[in-house]
Image: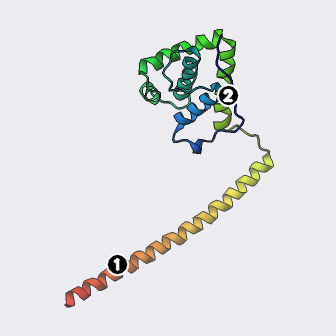
Amino acid sequence: MCQVIIGINLQKMDLMFYKNKSDLYRAIVEKHTNLELSTPTRQFNYVFARSCYYYLCRKFGLMSFAKISATVNKNHATVMHSLKELPYIIKHDRVCNSIFQKIVSEVRKDYFIPKTKKTLDQLVTNHNYYLLENGNLKNIVKKLESKVKRLTNKNKEMKRIIYVMADTD
């Protein structure tokens, strides 16, 4: 039986707080298992926690085996073997399956935007707003283009004056 301690902290993870996704995934797994992933041990609960972390990095972070292994000072083959064994652990151990599902659902829930249904009126209103905004932006672009043209002409005139002044000396 999986002996991982479930210690769920109710505060939400924030991606801005972490340097990269692997740090975020590590924090999520460590939060749910109350374990330090880089602890060098072969105890099952640590192996399972690291497997969950590897899964998140591979599936959601799209990281290579080498990059994942470097984050926890393991060999890439260890990561590959762990990912190969994870489905069997989840299938045959209900507690581990429960923990794994909570970890994965937290990653999915917090970092994937759910689709929302909008009414036709909301869509029409949004469309009209974006048409107006597009028109305003086009006017701003025209004004900026004319300003750039004027500045370019002034620059050419200044260069001509400097060239004429340099020739008179």
Alpha carbons under labels 1 and 2: distance apart: 62 Å
Task: Report the amino acid beneath label 1.
Answer: Lys
Residue depicted at 71% across the width and 53% down the height:
127
Q: Secondary structure at mark 1?
A: helix
Which label sits on residue 156? 1
| Numbered label tally | 2
User: Is 126 drawn above or below residue 83 in the view shown?
Assistant: below
- Nearer mark to the viewer, of 1 and 2: 2
Residue 76 pos. (x, y %): 42, 21
| Residue position marked by numbered label 2 in the rendering | 105
Residue 96 pos. (x, y %): 65, 16
- Is residue 110 left or right of 159 when viewed as pictured? right
Which label sits on residue 47? none
Viewer-proximal residue among 42 and 32: 42
Q: Quadrant of residue 15?
A: top right
Mark 1 or mark 2, which has the lower sequence index? 2
Residue depicted at 46% across the width and 30% down the height:
71
